[in-house]
Image (cartoon, rainbow, N blue to C red):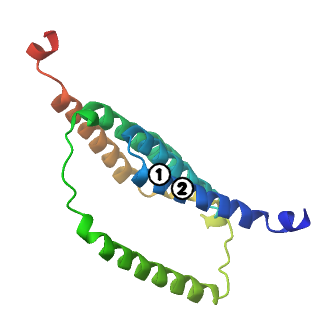
Amino acid sequence: MDFLVAHFSQAVFLFLAFFSLGGAVGVVVLRQPVHAALSLLASFLGVAGLFVLARGEFLAAVQVLVYAGGVMVLFLFVIMFVNVRAVGKEAQYLRPLVPLAVVGGLLFSALALTAMWALGRRPPADAFPLVSVAGQEVGNTEAVGWILYREYLLPFEVVSVLLLVAMVGAIVLGRKPKEMEKA
């Protein structure tokens, strides 16, 4: 029990990492599109948990709100709109590329392990969660909010109006003509 208490953050990290990787593998492996989308949701939530573990509360909140919320709803709407089951089967053109993908995956894994080994030899960075903004020490989320709504308010509002216009345009383009709605 003492070992678990002493290494609790590592255990939580490993659980969240395997949860995220399992969700990512499920996206590729599962045949039903809705199941794959739900697996992607699990991967998004696992990544948000990793952000919380790394003291990135703002990034975790954005991950949950934007990706797990907005993007997943968009994916599910597209899956329902396209009716994937009606799409016919196509020939497999990627079969000859499987050996190349395996070799590329092994090379990428070797590169990632080398990078982790090199980073592991450096002293750990000081991850202090408080940031000084305008002479006050605040957390990461407050610092991002302070800078976003004080210094970058105009670009933030311009982007929000642009996204609203794009959403209304997508709705107008996606609507059926009135003749087809009645039929």
Front in this rendered view, residue 77 or 24? 24
Q: Quadrant of residue 107?
A: bottom left
Front in this rendered view, residue 147 or 174? 174
**Residue matched to label 2:** 22
- For label 2, the SS is helix
Front in this rendered view, residue 154 or 96? 96
Q: Position of residue 120 (x, y in %)?
A: 63, 85
Amino acid beneath label 2: Gly
Quarter of the image with the C terminus in it:
top left
Which residue shows up at 50% across the image and 51% down it?
Answer: 44
Q: Are marks 2 and 1 in contact (CB under 8 Å)?
A: yes
- For label 1, the SS is helix
Quarter of the image with the N terminus in it:
bottom right
Amino acid beneath label 1: Gly
Q: Residues within 10 Å of mark 1 (few under 14, many from 20)?
A: some
Instruction: Please indicate whether residue 108 sits to the left or right of residue 165 in the image.
Output: right
Instruction: Please indicate whether residue 55 sits to the left or right of residue 114 in the image.
Output: right
Q: From this viewpoint, is residue 43 visible?
A: yes
Q: From this viewpoint, is residue 137 visible?
A: no
Q: Relative to residue 93, is residue 74 depicted above or below?
A: above
**Residue matched to label 1:** 26
Q: Relative to residue 2, is residue 167 depicted above or below?
A: above
Instruction: Please indicate whether residue 61 sits to the left or right of residue 75 in the image.
Output: right
Q: Which mark is residue 146?
A: none
Which residue shows up at 22% across the image and 33% down it?
Answer: 86
Q: Could you tell me how far apart the alpha carbons at marks 2 and 1 are, in whole angstroms?
A: 6 Å
Q: Position of residue 96 (x, y in %)?
A: 24, 69
Q: Relative to residue 113, is residue 88 depicted above or below?
A: above
Q: Quadrant of residue 17?
A: bottom right
Front in this rendered view, residue 4 or 72? 4
Which residue shows up at 40% across the image and 38% down it?
Answer: 34
Which residue shows up at 60% across the image and 64% down it?
Answer: 133
